Amino acid sequence: MRIVGTSRVAQQHLLLSTCIVVVLLSASAAQTSGDASSFQPNATPAEKAAALNLRRNAESGSAKAQSELSKAYMAGTIFKQNTPEAVRWVMAAANQGLAEAEVDLAVLYLQGTGVPQDYSKGFSWMRKAANQHNPKAEYNLGLLYGLGRGVGKDIPEGIRWYLKSAESGNPQAAYSMGIAYEQGVGVSRDLVRAYMWHYLAANRFGYYLSQKPLQDLSVKIGPAKVEEGRQQAAAWIKAHSNVKPVSR
């Protein structure tokens, strides 16, 4: 191509500038269309389009999209599994204060997945989410206190967080409260209260693991105490009518 009216040096500069623009435009197009190698071979065009839209929303700063993108990279069903990218995006979402992402990041630190294992950081991120009344975080924080991971072991404090989670509708936490009252762990032993929590876990929240303890307690405490436990459960349901079961 001949460029009219310019010196040889100017032509070279102009050609170089043109090449740079072409490279930048090509990179931009690749970013918009997505690198084909980043997708699973069996991903459909519709799935790829949805995934790219999710990534655009994440890049635009949506904490929810960043969290979902992290899950997508970790799952490896549409995008190829990419743990570093999953960590990068969950950190971005957690740093914006999204409780769901704070839980996921806490779990990564506790397990040492994609980051060096660090119980203290895991506990810290879980605490942030629990302080936002996230039921899963409240339950996990109870576990961490009970095990002494990332914090000094404190069973009564762990039970306190189980209770918060149970009152938010977490079936596992309701089950754990039933066990705590049945065995007198972190609370005074109270079989009627244990029956109440197992009744709620099994019949209100659909948690099948509470069915066996419920049957055993029915035999152990007798019909009168069973009725008392059911009345306590009915009173709890009435006082927490807006609480729905949390999916596990």
Image (cartoon, rainbow, N blue to C red):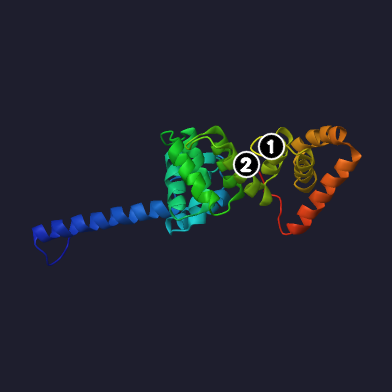
Describe the element under mark 2 as helix, strand or loop.
Answer: helix
Q: Of all residues shown, which one is farthest toward the right? A: 223
Q: Of all residues shown, which one is farthest toward the front? A: 188
Q: Please provide percent x and percent y for residue 219.
A: 87, 33
Screen quadrant of the C terminus:
top right
Q: Determine whether 173 is above or below 6 in the image.
A: above
**As shown in the figure, which amino acid type bears the numbered disc 2?**
Ile
Viewer can see residue 1: no
Q: Determine whether 241 is above or below 186 in the image.
A: below
- Where is mark 1, residue-wise? 180
Is residue 2 or residue 171 the one in the foreground?
A: 171
Describe the element under mark 1 as helix, strand or loop.
Answer: helix
**As shown in the figure, which amino acid type bears the numbered disc 1?**
Ala
Q: Do labels 2 and 1 touch, CB within 8 Å?
A: yes
Instruction: Determine the residue positioned at 54% across, 43% down.
Output: 78
Of the numbered discs 2 and 1, the one sitting upstream in the chain is: 2
Gap between marks 2 and 1, in whole Å? Answer: 8 Å
* 32 sits to left or right of 244: left
Q: Determine whether 231 is above or below 145 in the image.
A: below
- Where is mark 2, residue-wise? 159
Instruction: Determine the residue positioned at 46% across, 56% down.
Output: 56
Q: Quadrant of residue 2?
A: bottom left
Instruction: Determine the residue positioned at 85% across, 36% down.
Output: 221
Q: Please provide percent x and percent y for residue 61.
A: 44, 58
